[in-house]
Image (cartoon, coloured by chain):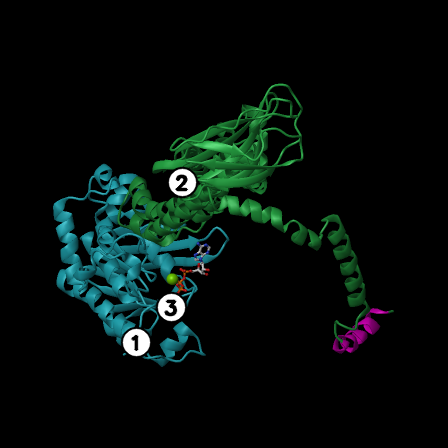
Chain colours: A cyan, B green
């Protein structure tokens, strides 16, 4: 279970990105976070694995307050939290396989890995993960030779290597076309359904959120303006979240 | 004129265009003055392109026939006596022979300015030779070149040179020279090869010096790393400033400085090129650090990697290939520069080149020129190829 309690993030410049946010995510949920650009979705996801330091509040995951961890404890918490990014965040000049293997860094001997050596089981596991996302044949290509959709699959394979129990996905399909978006989200959905991985995923399109979410929360200016089931978002709610001017765009 | 009037006038002015404006005529006038002065002060004289043309043709013909290969030489020499001026007993003519080479003069005594015919027999056939005048004292003079015919015979008309009269006999020499055996690398080629190697090593050392200093400095000159606090920002500005100053001073000037400091020679060249390399590489490297994509760093950190692992997996792949590419490019530039840095005392092949040019030994200079061209071309090719492979 993930509990976010009174989370506040104020950036150095004084921007209040998150304001006293509290919610709970049960194990095995597929929680989608929606909200306009700048509403604080990325900040929220990055606070959970402490890529960004929260200003105030607590984040309790499986009974451990992540905000209190540091050093090795923090790294150990992070290695069970996979993260998927809008820009894929692959190391472009490295091979696909190396990118996938880097998901294992939290587990392996740091000195051996520093000279590029991974245990044989990990290499095998990496190939299995690549096979699972359907790009085994690309393993030895340079990451930047792949298409956007393929790169995001590498991103998923990297997260899989962490054997995560929680996945944070920050707009994982925002730079992909609709068909590819669905195929990527389906991989995440499979993980959620078959392996019970808890997913926190921010999405731009409400139609996508409706299709995959078990629950939705909506942010506006760093505050939660909606929390509930996908079906509960009607026109009035939609206008509340996205503003009066907005019109719904469908992604099928 | 009030501000309002001015504003009203402006749109009226514009349609008249730049050409008709007084300012343009002024600018044109100033421009003409500047160019007139420049023409004068750079002593442009187009006629010299024509009058000097034969000289350059002479030099270029020698440069394009560099003294790269040589063959062993053999020669044959025949001497005969001549009296100047005539006395009662002029020297005997050389005895004719069936097989031995000999010279026949039209007369065996005379005075300067008189024509004289020299005829040779039984010499090496079809060979180039020279007729020389050997006075009993003083310098030997070449008087004519000839080619022996198929029977080893030649006739050459000369005019008796104005040499000091003396009681002793003068000698007239016919010497034939020819090459034998297989060609081998000339002495010049070997010297140039040695110096070329020195040049490439010089560039290597200079580049190495540059790399070792520039790698740590590049991090201190990267804005994204140094903007965290005021003191680090000051370091950033100081190092950037030094880079810019050092870089704007040409390596040739550094070479002059270091030639005075550590003496003429390749070490001065290493320091001069090294100095310039530090600044040039430092700037390129730091720009690379500045353009690092933070996404992968974020992603690798999120997997639970420690700082060392994050550097190895997310930072190194981003900066090492471009660092290598810049370094090879720099080495390429340094080889190019080191070929000329010798001209101002920095050692290497440039030193030879400038010496030979000053001694008007263009055939030797030609070897250096060709060696430089080839090495620069090859380096350029290799560096382009390797850079393409790694980036
Ligand atoms: N590093 C930062 N420093 C200062 N302010 C920041 C920083 N990152 C984000 N912000 C601000 O915090 C607010 C929330 O940003 P955030 O990136 O979390 O929004 P988002 O919902 O992810 O937007 P988007 O949909 O465009 O990705 C914005 O006003 C943004 O300008
Ligand atoms: Mg975002």
Pointer 1: what residue?
A: A207
Is B206 colored magenta in this rendering? no
**Label 1 secondary element:** helix
The answer for how far apart the CA atoms under marks 2 and 3 are is 102 Å
- Mark 2, other Cα within 10 Å: few <14 / some 14–19 / many ≥20: some
The percent coordinates of residue B6 (x first, y second) are 82, 71
Task: Tell me the mark number nearer the camera, choosing from 2 and 3.
Answer: 2
Residue B271 vs A198, above or below: the answer is: above
Please give the name of the residue rendered at 66% of the width and 53% of the height, measured from the top-left corner.
Answer: B49
Instruction: Look at the magenta stretch and give its main secondary structure.
Output: helix
- Front-most of B109 and A109? B109
How far across and how far down the image is residue B112, in percent? Answer: 67, 31
Q: Residue under circle 3?
A: A35
Res. B330 in view: no
Q: Quadrant of the N terminus of chain B?
A: bottom right
Measured in 3D between alpha carbons, the distance from the residue under mark 1 to the one under mark 2, in whole angstroms, is 102 Å
- Relative placement, left or right, of A29 versus B216 is left
Magenta region: B2-16
Residue B125 is labelled as 2
In the picture shown, does residue A194 fall above or below A47?
below
Identify the residue shown where x is 77% and y is 56%. Answer: B36
Q: Are marks 3 and 1 on the same chain?
A: yes
């Amino acid at each position: 279970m993930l509990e976010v309690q009174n989370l506040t993030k104020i950036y150095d410049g004084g921007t209040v990105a998150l304001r006293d946010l509290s919610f709970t995510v049960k194990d095995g949920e597929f929680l989608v976070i929606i909200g306009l650009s700048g509403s604080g979705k990325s900040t929220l996801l990055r606070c959970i694995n402490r890529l960004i330091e929260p200003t105030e509040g607590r984040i309790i995951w499986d009974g451990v307050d992540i905000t209190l961890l540091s050093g090795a404890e923090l790294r150990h918490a992070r290695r069970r939290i996979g993260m998927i990014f809008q820009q894929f965040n692959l190391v472009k000049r490295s091979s696909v396989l190396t990118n996938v293997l880097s998901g294992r860094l939290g587990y392996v001997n740091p000195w051996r890995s520093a000279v590029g050596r991974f245990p044989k089981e990990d290499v095998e596991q990496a190939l299995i993960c690549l096979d699972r996302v359907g790009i085994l044949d690309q393993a030895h290509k340079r990451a930047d030779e792949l298409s956007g959709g393929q790169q995001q699959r590498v991103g998923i394979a990297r997260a899989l290597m962490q054997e995560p129990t929680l996945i944070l996905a920050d707009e994982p399909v925002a730079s992909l076309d609709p068909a590819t978006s669905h195929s990527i989200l389906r991989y995440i959905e499979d993980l959620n359904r078959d392996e019970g991985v808890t997913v926190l995923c921010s999405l731009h399109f409400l139609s996508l959120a409706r299709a995959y979410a078990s629950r939705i929360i909506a942010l506006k200016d760093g505050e939660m303006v909606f929390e509930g089931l996908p079906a509960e978002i009607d026109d009035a709610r939609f206008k509340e979240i996205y503003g009066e001017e907005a019109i719904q765009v469908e992604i099928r | 004129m009030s501000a309002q009037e001015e504003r009203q006038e402006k749109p009226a002015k514009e349609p008249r265009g730049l050409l008709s404006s007084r300012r343009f005529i002024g600018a044109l006038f100033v421009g003409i003055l500047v160019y007139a002065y420049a023409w004068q002060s750079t002593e442009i004289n187009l006629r010299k392109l024509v009058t000097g043309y034969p000289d350059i043709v002479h030099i270029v013909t020698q440069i394009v026939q560099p003294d790269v290969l040589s063959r062993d030489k053999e020669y044959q020499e025949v001497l005969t006596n001549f009296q100047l001026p005539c006395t009662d007993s002029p020297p005997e003519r050389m005895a004719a022979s069936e097989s031995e080479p000999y010279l026949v003069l039209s007369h065996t005594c005379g005075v300067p300015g008189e024509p004289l015919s020299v005829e040779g027999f039984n010499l090496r056939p079809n060979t180039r030779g020279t007729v020389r005048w050997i006075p009993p004292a003083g310098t030997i003079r070449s008087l004519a070149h000839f080619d022996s015919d198929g029977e080893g015979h030649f006739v050459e008309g000369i005019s008796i040179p104005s040499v000091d009269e003396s009681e002793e006999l003068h000698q007239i020499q016919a010497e034939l020279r020819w090459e034998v055996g297989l060609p081998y690398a000339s002495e010049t080629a070997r010297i140039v090869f040695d110096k070329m190697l020195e040049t490439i090593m010089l560039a290597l050392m200079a580049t190495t010096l540059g790399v070792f200093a520039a790698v740590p400095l590049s991090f201190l000159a990267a804005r994204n790393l140094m903007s965290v606090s005021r003191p680090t920002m000051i370091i950033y500005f100081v190092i950037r400033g030094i880079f810019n100053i050092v870089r704007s001073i040409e390596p040739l000037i550094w070479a002059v400085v270091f030639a005075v400091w550590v003496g003429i020679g390749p070490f001065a060249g290493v320091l001069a090129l090294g100095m310039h390399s530090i600044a040039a590489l430092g700037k390129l490297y730091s720009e690379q650090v500045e353009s690092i994509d933070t996404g992968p760093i974020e992603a690798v950190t999120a997997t639970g990697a420690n700082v060392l692992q994050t550097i190895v997996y997310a930072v190194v792949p981003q900066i090492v290939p471009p660092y290598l590419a810049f370094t090879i490019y720099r080495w390429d530039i340094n080889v190019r520069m080191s070929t000329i840095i010798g001209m101002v005392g920095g050692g290497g092949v440039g030193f030879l080149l400038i010496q030979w040019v000053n001694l008007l030994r263009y055939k030797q200079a030609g070897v250096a020129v060709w060696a430089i061209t080839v090495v620069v071309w090859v380096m350029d090719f290799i560096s382009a190829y390797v850079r393409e492979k790694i980036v």
